[in-house]
Amino acid sequence: MGFARFSRRFFSSQANRAAYSFITTPIFYVNAAPHIGHLYTAVLGDAAHRWSQLAGATPTIFTTGTDEHGLKIQKRLFDTAEISSTDYVRTTENRHVDTVHKFWNVLREGDHIYKGQYEGWYSVPDETFLSPSQATDGTEPGTKVSVETGHAVEWSSEENYMFRLSSFRDRLLEWIDSRPYPVIPESSRQRVRHWLLHETNSDLSVSRPRSRLHWGVPVPNDSSQTIYVWLDALVNYLTVSITPSQISHNSQTHRHDNGTEICGSVWPATNQIVGKDILKFHAVYWPAFLMAAGLPLPRRIVSHAHWTIGKSKITQKSVWLPRQMQTSPTPWVTYSRGSVPRDSTPGDPDSNFTPSCSPRSRGRIFTVPPSVERVKKTSH
């Protein structure tokens, strides 16, 4: 599927239906130099944001962000690529911590969170607990790895706060099958259906002992526990859209002229753009958290495939792209805004990035992408 067709199908129709546009990327947790995967997510969000502006949506909001560790390096990359976000949230900002605390308290007051003993496999790189079926034998004797990511896992037994995920299974299944489908492309929606059918029969750990995770937002009224990093990160979408006082089981909702239900100023998001590696967090855990808090669910979650380098997964050792952008930014800005969206779309399998894809090859830096031509025609 070409980017122009992707834009028409996933974004223009969305903008036409919505009186407002609220587009998000995840908060990027940067433990090394940002790579083309981060750039790709941001460029897709920026393209959707600009498309919504052309379509006349009011207001048009586009948010992104990072943890404190990645702030400078991430902002430099996005500034170079001319990513036009309207808000940039950091996980250590007071407004975010306040929103996380309020969200946690609403879940706790609704009896959706309880304290219990958790035992299971934990992946440190993925920052997530795994069910027995999600862990398999590693190449080294006596080791286990994540089935999905291949990262090593360790057995963990600790006292945590637990979220009653299992009680939302039926509502989540009803949501994922509702039309228009809330998760696209269809292959991603089917993955979510599989998870809901087979991996939501148990509850979800939403904290870790402070002794094992000393950074992050502390659990309110329990300094011995730190809020699970993914609950913390997901709440950033509320940080930039509503005030803590608007997070309540009794939240007042109203409707735009086209009938869209909203809570507060702009929530829910119209498009949440994520990589396929974090789809479960956004399309299983996030909707369940919102249901528990009595808040509207995002209208659409767009999941895109990964980029590889030489058909191998991008790692911390294969991040030469940002260095190239810093030493010669102009051609890379043009490439990121044109060829990157053209060379891969959310519905495609993983896309391979090689030096032959670069802006110095085959004169592609001077090629106007079909998506740009189409926008030019429709804007006259």
Image: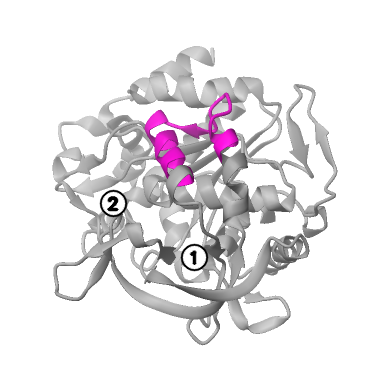
Q: Residues within 10 Å of mark 2 (few under 14, many from 20)?
A: few
Q: Which dot marks residue 328?
A: 2
**Looking at the picture, how far across and down is residue 182, in whole percent?**
55, 33
Disc 2, SS: loop
Q: Is residue 95 left or right of residue 303?
A: right
Front-most of 28 and 82?
28
* Residue 66 visible to an observer of this rendering: yes
**Looking at the picture, how far across and down is residue 291, in whole percent?**
68, 47
Residue at which label 1 appears? 71
The amino acid type of the residue labelled 1 equals Leu
Which residue is drawn at the image coordinates 44% and 59% (left, top)?
Answer: 74
Front-most of 38 and 281?
281
Disc 1, SS: helix
Which residue is drawn at the image coordinates 31% and 38% (left, top)?
Answer: 335
Q: Which residues are magenta?
A: 173-196
**Looking at the picture, how far across and down is residue 240, in whole percent?**
67, 52
Front-most of 122 and 305?
122
Mark-to-mark CA distance, 1 and 2 = 21 Å
In the picture, which quadrant includes the C terminus? top right
Q: Is residue 49 magenta?
A: no
The amino acid type of the residue labelled 2 equals Ser
Front-most of 127 and 340?
127
In the picture, which quadrant includes the N terminus? top left
Q: On the image, which quarter does residue 24 sit in?
A: top right
Q: Is residue 191 magenta?
A: yes
Which numbered mark, 1 or 2, is in the foreground of this view? 1
Q: On the image, which quarter does residue 266 sit in?
A: top right
